[in-house]
Image (cartoon, rainbow, N blue to C red):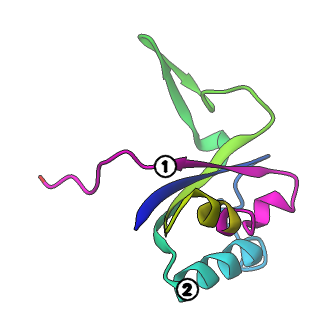
Amino acid sequence: MAQYAVLIYNGDSAHRPNRTAQDTETCDRHAEELERTGAMVAAWAFTPRDLATSVRGDTIVDGPYLGDRDIVAGIYLLEAPDLDAALAIARLNPACQEGGGVEVRPVAGGGVVQP
């Protein structure tokens, strides 16, 4: 089955260090559903934008790389038979209903790097 990366864009991440269960409730429910169906292979939630550090050339800058209103809040990897199926799953991400969105990209290759 093909794999698709789903990049989550939103105003910021709900996964701050002092978050509550209520802060991440919709995200957690969505992740549990994807796990239950077997579609999600792996997932990573990122911390809020104020914890980001960017590298631009030889300069290190506090904050996210892009100055846009949305940031990459997380990423997960899906297995789906085709792009249409991956898009149908990705549309269910809470960010799509909460003012953000997702980007779906076919995975060209890769995997866990062994030391």
Which residue is painted at 72% across and 66% down in the image?
A: 93
Say what secondary structure mark 1 lies in: strand
Q: Which amino acid does label 2 sit on?
A: Thr
- Viewer-side residue, 69 vs 62: 69
Which residue in the structure is indicated by mark 1? 106
Which residue is painted at 81% across and 35% down in the image?
A: 69
**Local crowd at mark 1 within 10 Å, few (<14), some, or many (≥20)?**
some
Q: Quadrant of the N terminus?
A: bottom left
Asked if disc 2 and disc 1 are in contact, CB closer than 8 Å, the reply is no
- Viewer-side residue, 100 vs 47: 100
Q: What stretch is highlighted in magenta?
A: 89-114
**Local crowd at mark 2 within 10 Å, few (<14), some, or many (≥20)?**
few
Q: Which amino acid does label 1 sit on?
A: Pro
Q: Does the magenta stretch include residue 96?
A: yes
Instruction: Point out the residue furthest to the top here.
Output: 58
Say what secondary structure mark 2 lies in: helix
Taking the image as shown, residue 110 lies to the left or right of residue 7, namely left
Vertical position of residue 59 compared to residue 17: above or below: above
Which residue in the structure is indicated by mark 2? 37
N-term mark: 2 or 1:
2
Taking the image as shown, residue 3 lies to the left or right of residue 95, namely left
Taking the image as shown, residue 59 lies to the left or right of residue 9, namely left
- C-alpha span from label 2 to label 1: 20 Å
Which residue is painted at 55% across and 86% down in the image?
A: 37
Vertical position of residue 106 compared to residue 95: above or below: above
Vertical position of residue 89 compared to residue 13: above or below: below
Vertical position of residue 64 compared to residue 34: above or below: above
